Amino acid sequence: MIDNAAASIPGLQVPMLLSSAKSGAIQVKADAAEAQAKADNVSSTPTLLVGQTGTTPHEVALNSPTDSATLTAAIQGALRG
């Protein structure tokens, strides 16, 4: 499945992608991303978290995949403090 999706991207070197995905360096990054997701209570994608730098962000629950109004309101609220 990944092979087919990757092959659909013009210019992507699929064999290099697949071999790199198995490297230790990539595993370290994947482990770090998973640890951060657990720390932020992120269990699905996409998950949108909004907040000011240095504060605990809050999750923005959209009413639909195209619900830009809710996201815009959350960002504007965060900017106002």
Image: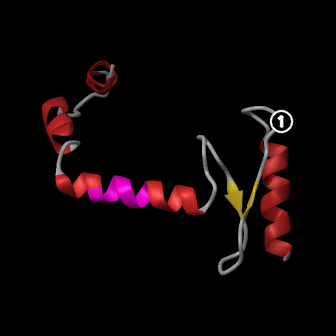
Q: Position of residue 23 (x, y in %)?
A: 17, 49
Front position in the image: 50 or 37: 37
Where is 11 relative to 49, above or below?
above
Q: In this view, does 41 lie to the left or right of 70?
A: left
Q: Which residue is drawn at 78% across and 32% down?
A: 64
Helix, strand or loop for disc 1: loop
Query: In which image quadrant can residue 45 be found?
Result: top right
* Residue 58 picture quarter: bottom right
Counting from the top left corner in percent of width and height, residue 62 is at 79, 41
Mark 1 = which residue? 63
Rendered location of residue 36, percent (x, y): 50, 62
Classify residue 28 as left or right of residue 37: left
The magenta segment: 28-33
Residue at the bottom extreme, as displayed: 54
Q: Position of residue 17 (x, y in %)?
A: 20, 38
Main secondary structure of the magenta stretch: helix
Asked whether, in this view, residue 37 is left or right of residue 60, the answer is left
Q: In this view, does 46 lie to the left or right of 68?
A: left
| Residue type pointed to by label 1 | Asn
- Residue at 60% x, 45% y is 43
Is the C terminus in the top left, top right, bottom left or bottom right quadrant?
bottom right
Q: In front: 73, or 51?
A: 51
Q: What crowding class fits label 1: few (fewer than 14 Cα within 10 Å), some (14-19), or many (20 or more)?
A: few
| Residue toward you, 4 or 10 | 4
The residue drawn where x is 29% and y is 59% is: 28
Residue 47 versus residue 1 in the image, above or below: below
